[in-house]
Image: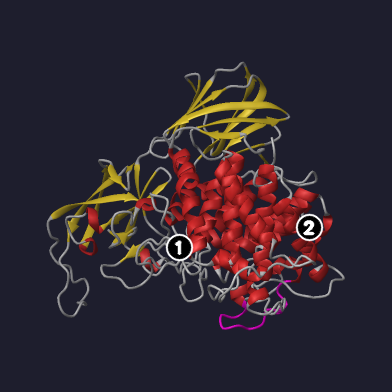
Amino acid sequence: MGSGLIALGPAAVAAQQPLSAGAVVLRTGFWQHRVELNARVTLAAGLRELGEAGTLDNFRLAAGTGTGDYHGKLPFLDTDVYKWLEAASWELQRAPGAELAGQVDELIELVGSVQQPDGYLNTYNQVVHGGERWVDLAMGHEMYTAGHLIQAGIAHRRATGAQTLYGIAVRVADLLVAEFGAGGRRDGYCGHPEIETALVELYRESNERAYLDLAARLVDGRGRGLLGDRPFGRRYFQDLEPVRETTGIYGHAVRALYLATGLADLSLETGDAGLLKVLRAQWDDLVSGKTYITGGTGARHRDEALGDSFELPADQAYTETCAAIALLQLSWRLLLATGEAEYADMFERVLYNGFLAGLSLDGERFFYVNPLQVRPGSTLGPDGRQPWFSCACCPPNVMRTLASLPHLLATTDASGLVIHQYAAATINAVAGVPVGVEIATGYPYSGTVEVRVTEPGEWTLALRVPGWARGVATVSVDGTDIPVPDGYVRVAREWRGGEVVRLELPLDVRLVVADPRVDAARGCVAVERGPLVYCAEQVDQAADLDLVTVTGSAEAGEPLRIGGVEVPTVRLGAKQNHGASGWPYRSYPGATEPGPEVPVVAVPYFAWANREFGAMRVWLPS
């Protein structure tokens, strides 16, 4: 079997090893539905939108085969094509198809027609700037764009064995080494990190040390202020101080998390304990006050930034879909590095909530911004899901994440197989010895996970106990209960084959409160059930959503069919309040008699805005 999303080098220092491509085969269930919808609907819609937006025409202009003006005003639109190619490549690896393969080959030929003899490839600079290069490292995104091309080239080679797109990517990378490597012609780094993790993966694929060295050079050079003082300042670019001295995480959310992901890749391949220490400090800063309950990050619209600790407004949350994807990437690499459950727990939170909300249930419409509250008649934030955007970074990013998802569910370690995320699937891998299981589960709507061992031998099966289930989860082996520690349950034995390990995760409804320093959520509760965060939409309520107060009772409700998909609901007890008329302030305590009891129906956050776009709340007054 070929390599998957990440293929650690032979000298990598990691607690976990990613599985080879094809090791995980999804079966009928929640994630198979979403992955196959991505393959059947979302990828096709993405290719159509790339054509209608003129993004493909930009390549024809740069190649000299098209006429007209450059489409769009952003310098990184090429990345939409590259992310689509990466997504399509992972899909070809999962389920080869002649039609998709033909579309991929056609696009690769178009991309190759633009490349200049020395390897340079960037349609915006070649058309708009007349071929002038490296004109604006802070905002020109040339290295960022090259990073996505490199990742697409690696994916295509791993998926198909073909060298076409990979060869294009290698020539771009070699040019970057010549320009920005040690002894190169230029000194600088990209205003939008991404190239770092791409270069490390290219090192893994090629075993060419120059790519790893360039990634390290770009990281260690950062913080000298070379990007200048742009309108949002040096914090925006993570350019305030040397990376190895940056123990907080700040600035543009996607940039910050992509940079941290590059640090994690470097740490994995070099064993640099100093980088891992920095990452742990940044992680603690992120999760202790800069992450929403959905796993979303990015509190500010103005500069798409993380904001200060506990600056987590619900209605003004930016929480870009790409930032959720970046946090998935970082969590996965820290999990590989350490094997610690907290990173898998965060991966799960982001996956089911902050990430999945970015795609409609029909697979054709997207959110760029993912608020936790929409007021009636609000003019702030999104006005509904969109099929594409003028800055379309999120849609193809969603596509490549879903297409590569089977690579991100399990790993091996020195003793056996470790399952981090639960989906109906068959897993066959090698951890020194062959290991294999079949997983049957209705997760996340059911808390029962049955794992049947299919590969005899002496090895360890490890199952993650989600943080929300600690103290209530149970595990049995062929009907006999075993102790359940925090983190991972490890069952080590000589398997004969056919044994069933059963994990029970009670899906009780949980009412959650925020740290009082989160001003936007003070006096409110949120609803969780299993890994899912819930929200209340006005369309499901008999009362005005902005005038209800939750009384404390909560239970599972009747399922709803939304967008052709049946989703579970939660029913909360609440009272209808009386809104103030005229001046909305009164003397403390100023209590009024509560109104009649009314039920509040909550649906999974990922399912909101799939019927009509209207008022919604994750945090409900209590």
**Image spot of residue 573 (x, y percent):** 22, 50
Relative vertical location of residue 496 with respect to residue 270 in this rendering, above or below: above
**Image spot of residue 437 (x, y percent):** 57, 27
Mark 2 burial class by Cα count in 10 Å: few <14, some 14-19, many 20+: many
What predominant SS class does the magenta segment belong to? loop
**Image spot of residue 612 (x, y percent):** 28, 58
Q: Which residue is mark 1?
A: 388
**Image spot of residue 152 (x, y percent):** 65, 54
Q: Nearer the viewer, mark 1 or mark 2?
A: 1
* SS for dot 2: helix
> Can residue 315 be seen?
yes
Start-end of magenta stretch: 222-234
Q: In the rendered picture of this protein, how many numbered marks are placed on residues? A: 2
Nearer-N-terminus badge (1/2): 2
Query: Is there a contact, CB below 8 Å, between mark 1 and mark 2?
Result: no
Residue 144 falls in image quadrant: bottom right
> Can residue 331 be seen?
no
Mark 1 burial class by Cα count in 10 Å: few <14, some 14-19, many 20+: many
The image quadrant where one finds the N terminus is: top right
Q: Residue at x 46, y 68 (%)?
A: 299
Say which amino acid is labelled 1.
Trp
Q: Which residue is mark 2?
A: 212
The image quadrant where one finds the C terminus is: bottom left
Check if residue 228 falls in the magenta segment.
yes
Front position in the image: 481 or 222: 222
Say which amino acid is labelled 2.
Leu
Front position in the image: 83 or 328: 83
